[in-house]
Image (cartoon, rainbow, N blue to C red):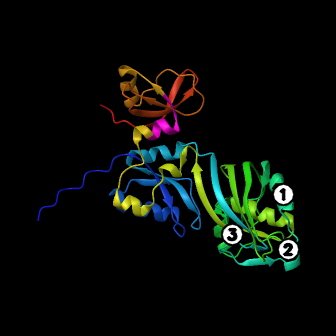
């Protein structure tokens, strides 16, 4: 029986709603099978326990991934108070556990006071099991090897840290304290570290119980699909042109400039700040660029020369 070759996958982005228990690499591997191409990559890694928005590039759109402005992220999280763990989340070993009396004394007002202190520009010590490199080795790899890892604090910004629900304080007459929160923060902020620091400031310990990323940069859950949904309908969330228009300021150029850009030639500067995208008169993406003196420096050419 003669088999027709499978057509090549179209370039673009998938906004995947990552399930719990999968690494970002696992999602890429599954996506390669679904989309029928090896040219797949991801931006903005999510921990295995986390769910939510993971941006995946297909074919030529993988060239975009390193240039996407993903410097602002939003999460829905559940923080458990009363125990600190080795990983600052529910998957780690319990290091300390609060006495019932101490935990019962935690009030909504005390929680809100500490949340306020953890909002805005802060100095945050990343989790010891983070991907931060220490002398060229990931911190989590050192922890797995049995090393004691101490990381330096780094500046981050928590734009919003809102308590949405509270369960288990003495006011609700329960023996367990959990709070659901919304966190809107800069890239490099660790929500698990916020949980750790909240619990430490309250004197009872704390860790992250659940995490769901709702937005990363301009991409949100509204366009996200599960891997099962993608298996049923393997179509892009955004084709290459839509992805570029969503993520970058676009600069439309005429035919002669478009031809020069397609061939990787430098053209006059545009006066834009940061990274922008050249598009032709039909809105097709040509390249990413940035101004350098009086000329534009092409970072990535997206359109084949013609």
The answer to which of 35 and 65 lies nearer the viewer is 35
Q: Does 167 sit left or right of 51 as displayed?
A: right
Give me the disc on residue 101: none
In magenta stretch: residue 221: no
Looking at this view, name the residue that lies furthest to the left. Answer: 1
- Image height of 204 relative to 258, above or below: below
Q: Is residue 124 visible?
A: yes
Q: Which range is magenta?
A: 243-250
Give me the disc on residue 89: 3
**Residue shown at 39% from the left, 58% from the top:** 230
The quadrant in which residue 48 appears is bottom right
Q: How would you rate the neighbour count of disc 3 (Cα within 10 Å): few for under 14, some for 14-19, many for 20 or more? A: many
**Gap between marks 2 and 3 measured at Cα:** 21 Å
Q: SS for tag 2?
A: helix
Q: Does 149 sit left or right of 210 as displayed?
A: right
Which x, y percent locates residue 100? 84, 79
The answer to which of 48 and 109 lies nearer the viewer is 109
The answer to which of marks 1 and 2 sits earlier in the sequence is 2
The answer to which of 218 and 128 lies nearer the viewer is 218
Give me the disc on residue 114: 1
Residue linked to disc 2: 104
**Residue shown at 65% from the left, 67% from the top:** 140
Q: Please tell me whether mark 2 or mark 3 is closer to you in this view.
A: 2
């Amino acid at each position: 029986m003669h088999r027709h070759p499978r057509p090549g996958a179209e370039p673009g982005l998938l906004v995947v709603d990552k399930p719990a228990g999968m690494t970002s690499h696992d999602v890429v591997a599954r996506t390669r099978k679904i989309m029928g191409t090896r040219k797949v990559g991801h931006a903005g890694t999510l921990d295995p326990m986390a769910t939510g928005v993971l941006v995946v590039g297909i074919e030529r759109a993988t060239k975009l991934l390193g240039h996407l402005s993903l410097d602002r992220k939003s999460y829905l999280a559940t923080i458990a108070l009363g125990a600190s763990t080795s990983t600052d989340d529910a998957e780690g070993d319990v290091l300390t556990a609060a006495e019932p009396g101490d935990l019962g004394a935690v009030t909504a007002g005390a929680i809100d006071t500490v949340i306020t202190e953890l909002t805005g520009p802060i100095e945050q010590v990343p989790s010891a099991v983070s991907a931060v490199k220490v002398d060229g080795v990931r911190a989590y790899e050192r922890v797995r090897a049995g090393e004691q890892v101490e990381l330096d604090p780094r500046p981050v910004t928590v734009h919003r840290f809102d308590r949405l629900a509270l369960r288990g304080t003495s006011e609700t007459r329960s023996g367990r304290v959990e709070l659901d929160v919304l966190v809107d923060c800069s890239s490099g902020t660790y929500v698990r570290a916020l949980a750790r620091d909240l619990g430490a400031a309250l004197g009872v310990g704390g860790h992250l119980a659940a995490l769901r990323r709702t937005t990363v940069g301009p991409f949100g859950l509204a366009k996200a699909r599960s891997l099962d949904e993608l298996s049923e309908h393997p179509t892009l969330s955004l084709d290459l042109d839509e992805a570029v228009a969503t993520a970058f300021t676009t600069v439309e150029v005429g035919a002669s400039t478009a031809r020069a850009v397609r061939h990787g030639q430098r053209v006059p500067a545009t006066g834009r700040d940061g990274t922008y995208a050249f598009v032709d008169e039909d809105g097709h993406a040509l390249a990413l660029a940035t101004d350098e003196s009086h000329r534009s420096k092409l970072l990535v050419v997206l359109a084949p020369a013609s």
